[in-house]
Image: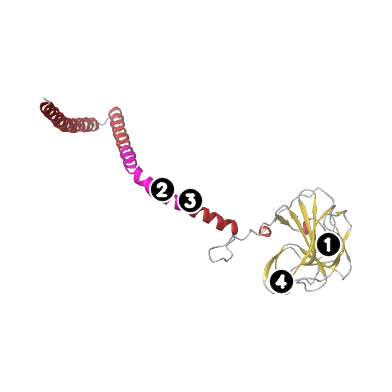
Amino acid sequence: MESTYRKRNYARHGFGMDWRKNKGKEDFVENVVKQILACCIIFLILFVIKSINLPATNMIANKIRSTLSYTVDWKNSYKSVTAFARNLNSINEKIFGSKNNKQEVNNDTKTDATKQDTGTNEQGTDNTEPVTDPTEIIEKGYVRINQEIAAPLDGIITSTFGMRQHPLLKKDEYHYGIDIDGKKGMDITAAMDGEVLETGYNDSYGKYVRLKHEEDLITFYAHCSEILVNKGEKVKLGTPIAKVGGSGTASGEHLHFEIWKGDKVLDPLKYIQLPLDPNMPD
């Protein structure tokens, strides 16, 4: 009985599979034939309508062509979606890989993040992106200053704001302020009410003072011979803050003066009035 039962089960299973295969083939052939007949009928109707050449028939013909085109587009979209679904597993494998690959990717990511934090590459050399120089942002127009402002030194302008040839380096460069001629030891005064933001020295500007003011304004005074104020000290317009000198890279005793609004450098001659040196080069 057990042998007979297994035989019938096997035979029934085989018959079912064969029947489904044959049924599938018959359905496929039947569908193809139906589609061919439908296409023939549509094109025949389209040909007849087009040959009549009336506004109404032309409109119908255009509508049929539009519908056929729309159907074809949807078929192409369906094929694209199907192809994507078939390849989804392989795409995931390529992106994520095996569990081991995932771990390697995570480790590599952590290593890269560490490199970025330290700013060095594997050889230990500096790999940090240079910080954008704020002096590259130049305000060529007029920015209104809503507070009293005065010239920090009574003298003549020997170099204006803008492109110029450096008097010592003999190369064209942008001059971010103005140069005011003066004698060594003359008082340099605060151009506006404010607070001492910084004092210091560097090779280019020599001894300098930086003041901060209301409206996000900064004034800068360079090439001083002596600094008279300290960081954090409050100053009023006209308060002496330094003495004229020629420290740093300077061709003589003078004051280099800049005005900043946030990250924009302004032309001081738009806000103060001083005579120009008639012998100043263009």
Distance between mark 3 and mark 4 Cα atoms: 52 Å
Q: Nearer the viewer, mark 4 or mark 1?
A: 4
Provide the residue span drawn in magenta: 76-105
Q: Are marks 3 and 4 in contact (CB under 8 Å)?
A: no
Q: Position of residue 96 (x, y in %)?
A: 41, 48
- The residue pinned by badge 4 equals 166
Looking at the image, which is closer to me, 99 or 119? 99
Whole-number angstrom distance, CA of label 1 to CA of label 3: 63 Å
Mark before the other along the chain sequence, 4 or 1: 4
Coordinates of residue 44 in the picture (x, y in percent) = 19, 31
Q: Secondary structure at mark 2?
A: helix
Quadrant for the C terminus in the image: bottom right
> How would you rate the neighbour count of disc 4 (Cα within 10 Å): few for under 14, some for 14-19, many for 20 or more?
some
Q: What is the CA distance from the residue labelled 4 to the residue labelled 2?
A: 62 Å
Q: Which comes before the other along the chain, label 4 or label 2?
A: 2
Residue behind mark 1: 274
Quarter of the rendering occupied by the N terminus: top left
* Viewer-proximal residue among 9 and 24: 9
Spatial CA distance of label 1 from label 2 is: 73 Å
Q: Which residue is mark 2?
A: 99
Which label was assigned to residue 106? 3
- Tag 4–tag 2 contact (CB < 8 Å): no
Q: Disc 1 vs disc 2: which is toward the camera?
A: 2
Q: Secondary structure at mark 4?
A: loop
